Amino acid sequence: MLSFLARRLLYAIPTLIAVSVVAFIIIQLPPGDYLSTLMADWASQGGAVEEGTLAAMRERYGLDQPMYVQYFKWVTGIVTRGDFGISFEFGKPVTELIWNRLGYSFLLAILTLIFVWAVAIPIGIISAVRQYSVTDYVATFFAFFFLALPNFVLALAAMYVLAAFFDQSVGGLYSAQYIDAPWSWGKFVDFLNHVWLPIFVIGTGALATMVRIMRANLLDELSKPYVTTARAKGMSELELLLRYPVRMALNPLISTLGWILPTVISGEILVSVVMSLPTTGPLLLRSLLSQDMYLAGSLIMLISVLTIIGTILSDILLAIADPRIRLE
């Protein structure tokens, strides 16, 4: 297992290099650069900048250099000093901007993942065991409904209902009096009162997908000969269900962890904008719109790292859940 993990970590290095190259190129594909966007904003406000000043700013930000020079400068800083560069728009180190928000993004991702699995697995089991029943049809309807409903629309609707009919504070992760306050029991309770709504909104799309996957996997397992053999030997339905089919049906579900984790992170971008969440989502959107390449590239790199971490975790969990994979 250790040699397997070592190989996967070694494979992750060229993967990250390839992702960083592609991300850096895509960010610079739109015409112009950060200064072009900045000049357009100033021009819309009636301002103007002299050519000499613009050239000096371009030299200061390194935008007068070829793309490959800018890329190697960025990557060298990350590898040698852990320096992700300076954000053009904010004028601060990228690490300072990211770390302030990354913790909340990770926390929301993990809590959303727990919520998705805790709800999807039981519903998928019930839908498969009671195939074509009222319960199955209801679960299927809501699964397709939430799968088709954009997360930001659900966020807007939920915020309106809670504010208009339940007089509940919505938006953000804290009430106004707790935003800058030190941690206390009151702030923790206030956080719990706010965080459940983003978790529900962000997790609905993945939840619907997981329910369908669990249902399909379990239906496939229930039709196999070993289930008939176990029933013939007199094993109770509950024991049979939990010992064999459910365990086997979880394997494909566990393998989806590699894409569920980054999907949750990327799915919270618009939700975070709508709900004013202090996560990396709004920061990524803003950096892409302004072509702040070092900030946008660093955030995309972190999402890629999440994909790799999720894939490795899914492999470990698969080896724990299924001895056959461990033996292989």
Image (spheres, rainbow, N blue to C red):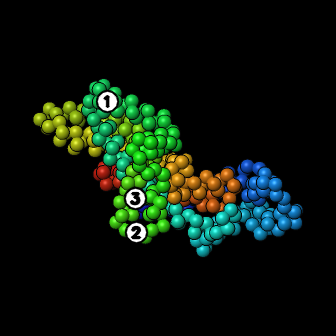
| Number of the front mark, 1 or 3 | 3
Tag 1 and tag 2, C-beta contact below 8 Å:
no
**Percent position of residue 255, x then y:** 40, 47
Please name the residue shown 29% across and 30% down the image.
Answer: 135
CA gap, disc 1 and disc 2: 44 Å
- Image coords of residue 236 (percent x, y): 14, 37
Q: Which residue is mark 2?
A: 183
Residue 235 can be seen in this image: yes
Badge 1 or badge 2: first in the primary sequence? 1
Q: Secondary structure at mark 3?
A: helix
Kind of residue at badge 3: Phe
Q: Which residue is the extreme one toward the bottom?
A: 81
Disc 3 packing (10 Å; few <14; some 14–19; many ≥20): some
Instruction: Write the residue at 52% across / 65% down.
Output: 100
Whichever of labels 1 and 3 marks the residue nearer the N terminus, that label is 1
Q: Check disc 2 and give the amino acid type.
A: Trp
Q: Secondary structure at mark 1?
A: helix
> Along the line of sight, which residue is nearer the eye, 131 or 221?
131
Q: Observer-nearest residue: 290 or 185?
A: 185
According to the image, label 3 marks what residue?
A: 191
Identified at 78% across, 51% down, the residue is: 44
- Residue 136: mark: 1
Estimate the spatial distance between the alpha carbons at disc 1 and disc 3, rounded to whole Å. 35 Å
98 with respect to 181 (left or right): right
Q: Is residue 324 above or below residue 299?
A: above
Mark linked to residue 271:
none
